[in-house]
Image (cartoon, rainbow, N blue to C red):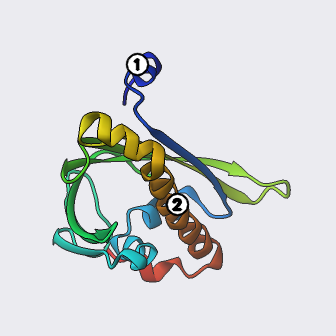
Amino acid sequence: MRCSWERRLVKVPLISLTTRIAASCETVFDLSCSIDLHLESTAQTREKAVAGRTSGLIGPGEEVTWEATHFGIRQRLTTRIVEYDRPRHFRDAMVDGAFARFDHDHHFEPTADEAGRETTIMTDTFDYTSPWGPLGRLADWLFLQRYMRRLLQKRNALIKTIAESGNAQRYLKR
């Protein structure tokens, strides 16, 4: 992840989202590792897992290659789980794809609600660099950062809905 002075110098986008979920860290962590849940959250892009881990829960050192249509263009993106500390944190990083680079950190903090029930604070940090130098930075400013934020918000909303519904088991197959 880039430091703040470097981020300001090169204007690298950073998307950070925080979601409170009424479920355990273990459940939320595992749902975040679910290939099947990810596919459901990206149905609008016709995303498929085409190589590496293609279903179940992705784990340390594993890769997945996604194929999806973004902006009318069919693309492939391969990511690897490069850090894994269940149920507190994992990072997936791009190995190959359309971005110049990205790191996606997922943090899970156990908390409790006002009634003392177990909850989790899930924080996603998506740190990326667009390709094509100044043209990529212009794309970030015009549309790409908003587009990526919406994709992540949709995924997080689905994780929250499933975790709080009590129906998480169908997504937690290893």
Q: Is residue 36 above or below residue 141?
A: below
Residue at the image point whose x is 20% and y is 68% from the top: 53
**122 with respect to 131 (left or right):** right
First of labels 2, 1 by sequence position: 1
Q: Nearer the viewer, residue 70 or 173?
A: 70
Q: Is residue 169 above or below residue 130?
A: below
**100 with respect to 84 (left or right):** left
Q: Nearer the viewer, residue 151 or 31?
A: 151
Q: Nearer the viewer, residue 167 or 137?
A: 137
Question: Residue at label 1?
Answer: 9
Number of other residues with Cα within 10 Å of mark 1, as a class: few under 14, some 14 to 19, many 20 or more: few
Quarter assignment of residue 66: bottom left
Give x and y (percent) for residue 99.
26, 47
Is residue 168 visible in the rendered image? The answer is yes
**What quarter of the picture does the C terminus occupy?**
bottom left
- Residue at disc 2, secondary structure: helix
- Residue at disc 1, secondary structure: helix
Number of other residues with Cα within 10 Å of mark 2, as a class: few under 14, some 14 to 19, many 20 or more: few
Callout 2 amino acid: Arg
Q: Is residue 102 above or below residue 152?
A: above
**101 with respect to 110 (left or right):** left
Callout 1 amino acid: Leu
Give x and y (percent) for residue 100.
23, 41
Q: Which mark is on residue 31?
A: none
**What quarter of the picture does the N terminus occupy?**
top left
Give x and y (percent) for residue 170.
44, 83
Q: Which mark is on residue 150?
A: 2
Give x and y (percent) for residue 63.
19, 58
